[in-house]
Image (spheres, helix red, strand yellow):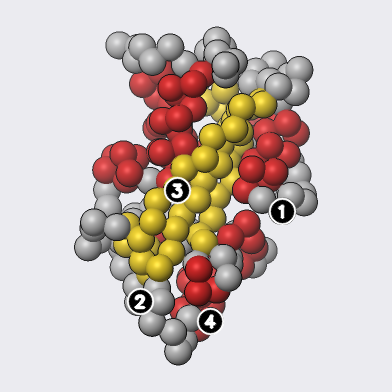
Amino acid sequence: MARRFTSDRLLIATHNPGKLAEIAALMAPYGVATIGAAAVGLPEPEETGTTFEANAQLKALAAAGRGMPALADDSGLVVPALDGAPGIYSARWAGPGRDFSRAMALVEARLAGTSDRRAAFVAVLALAWADRHVEIFRGEVHGRLVWPPRGTRGFGYDPIFVPDGESRTFGEIAPEEKHDISHRALAFKKLIAACFSGDVSS
């Protein structure tokens, strides 16, 4: 049985403002104050894992023990026609400047000559405590890639990803709507079901 979350504060182990805002919005109904890694001077650990699960756990454990549990996310775009790339290296494809316009162009260039545009967004959330106990949850959303990019909402590869059943990219979908269907939202729902009472605070 998963460990219950009983703290009123949660350290979000990310320096990505888009991820931080998305996770803070997801946590808001549960009366939990979220604190970003930058606010406590937490450096980004080197992501040496070979899976989303390993990297999420690595980041969560590196952040735990600062007076509150820590939540880390490892996520990325998985493209079957590229043998699963960019995968766990999704952020690194954007380079040190996190230029996702460059990363999206690189995906498009490498797909040249293939009609297979299937893709999936994967998110793994790891919730860690100071005693190194970790709970891990995975969410996936499947869809297809489009070009050119569309929409200015979201972040990362959102403007080229159209989820199944939709005609809009994640870059065109309002954040509150995306929170119901995204890979991170699906992982988050599993986390809430396992580690929270399920009672939304008023």
Quadrant including the N terminus: top right
Of badges 1 and 2, nearer the viewer stands 1
First along the sequence among labels 1 and 2: 1
- Pointer 3 residue: 140
Percent across and percent down for residue 10 are: 57, 23
Crowd tier of the residue under label 3, counting other residues whose Cα lies within 10 Å: few below 14, some 14–19, many 20 or above: many
What kind of element bears circle 2?
loop
Q: Amino acid at mark 1?
A: Thr
Percent across and percent down for residue 120 are: 44, 58
What kind of element bears circle 4?
helix
Task: Choose top left, top right, bottom left or bottom right for residue 58.
Answer: top right
First along the sequence among labels 1 and 3: 1
C-alpha gap between disc 1 and disc 4: 22 Å
Of badges 2 and 4, nearer the viewer stands 4
Percent across and percent down for residue 34 are: 52, 26
Percent across and percent down for residue 12 are: 58, 32
First along the sequence among labels 2 and 4: 4
What kind of element bears circle 3?
strand
First along the sequence among labels 3 and 2: 3
**In-front residue for pair 109/101:** 109
Of badges 3 and 2, nearer the viewer stands 3
The residue positioned 75% from the left and 33% from the top of the image is 62
Of badges 3 and 4, nearer the viewer stands 3
In the rendered structure, the answer to whether residue 107 lies left or right of residue 51 reads left
